[in-house]
Amino acid sequence: EAERPRVITLYFSDVDSAGHNYGPRSEQVAQALAEVDAELTYLVQTLRERGQAEQVNLIISSDHGMAEVDQRKYIIADELFDGSLTQNVRFSREIVSIFPKEGREELLYQQIAERYNPEQMRLYRKHELPERFQHQHHVRIAPIILLAEQPWIFVRRSLLPGLKADPSFFRARGSHGYDNTEPDMQGMLIAYGPAFKQQATVAQLSMVDFYNVMARVVGLTPAPNQGDPRALSLLLRD
């Protein structure tokens, strides 16, 4: 009994992989969902057969949503600024983080401000990032940030020949790095077991909020965090 784990985690990559490769509304994603559903059904049925279904708290969640990517709507990020003015640039499909060389931040920012299209992306200095991102003061956040608007994606200049020759050259059909207030970025959460209220519905919940819930369920004292303590009363039995 003393050696039994109090928390067991499983990760199913099927839906995420299918969403990236074929798009979130594809037949492949529907098939992946069916496969994961069958695996979860097997888990629940096994718990019932062993008489443990009412003793185990089961939490099913996604870590993010998924948006359709339009391969015709791409932004060549490194054509927006002079790369020789940068110390480091971090590229992803949805975010470009630019670390200028010393004394070059203002020049870099002005270059981008003159070239970017606000219908395709947002341009921020670090201190201008929305407060809800909670990134304004962290050392790892770049001084200049580009955030793509859904469904636009960033690409590097080196990919341009392949994209012009074949629009399907860019493999991804789905992505999940956009503003987390976008409906397509929202995840899902299902919790069932003796610790949780029955048939309770919560309109919106942050995974940071749910950290406190999980700590309470397993009897741990949570580390200091920015989760909303109201999640405890919304989800847990008295």
Image (tube, rainbow, N blue to C red):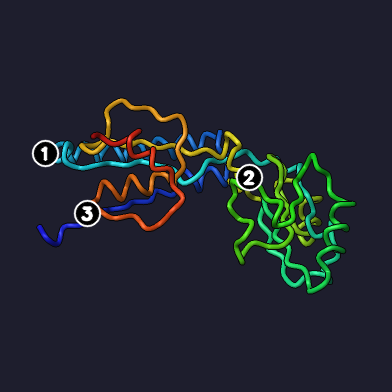
Q: Which mark is residue 51?
A: 1
Q: Amino acid at mark 3?
A: Arg
Along the line of sight, which residue is nearer the eye, 112 or 233? 233
Element under disc 2: loop
Marked residue nearer the N-terminal end (2 or 1): 1
Question: Mark 3 — residue?
Answer: 6
Marked residue nearer the N-terminal end (3 or 1): 3
Q: Is residue 166 visible in the rendered structure shown here?
A: no
Q: Amino acid at mark 2?
A: Tyr
Q: Amino acid at mark 1?
A: Gly
Please state if 217 lies on the left or on the right of 3 as rendered.
right
Question: Mark 2 — residue?
Answer: 178
Residue 156 in the image: above or below residue 130: below
- Residue occupying the point 34% across, 55% down: 222
2 and 1 marks in contact (CB < 8 Å)? no
Image coordinates of residue 83 in percent, x first then y, are: 82, 67
Marked residue nearer the N-terminal end (2 or 3): 3
Image coordinates of residue 70 in percent, x first then y, are: 70, 40
Please state if 75 lies on the left or on the right of 93 as rendered.
right
Image coordinates of residue 39 in percent, x first then y, are: 31, 41
Q: CA distance from mark 2 to mark 1?
A: 43 Å
Element under disc 3: loop
Res. 67 image quadrant? top right
Image coordinates of residue 216 in percent, x first then y, are: 28, 47
2 and 3 marks in contact (CB < 8 Å)? no
Residue 108 in the image: above or below residue 28: below
Question: Around disc 1, counting alpha carbons within 10 Å, would you say few (fewer than 14), some (14 to 19), or many (20 or more)?
Answer: few
Element under disc 1: loop
Q: CA distance from mark 2 to mark 3?
A: 35 Å
- Residue occupying the point 49% across, 46% down: 16
Q: Is residue 144 visible in the rendered structure shown here?
A: yes
Along the line of sight, which residue is nearer the eye, 230 or 195? 230
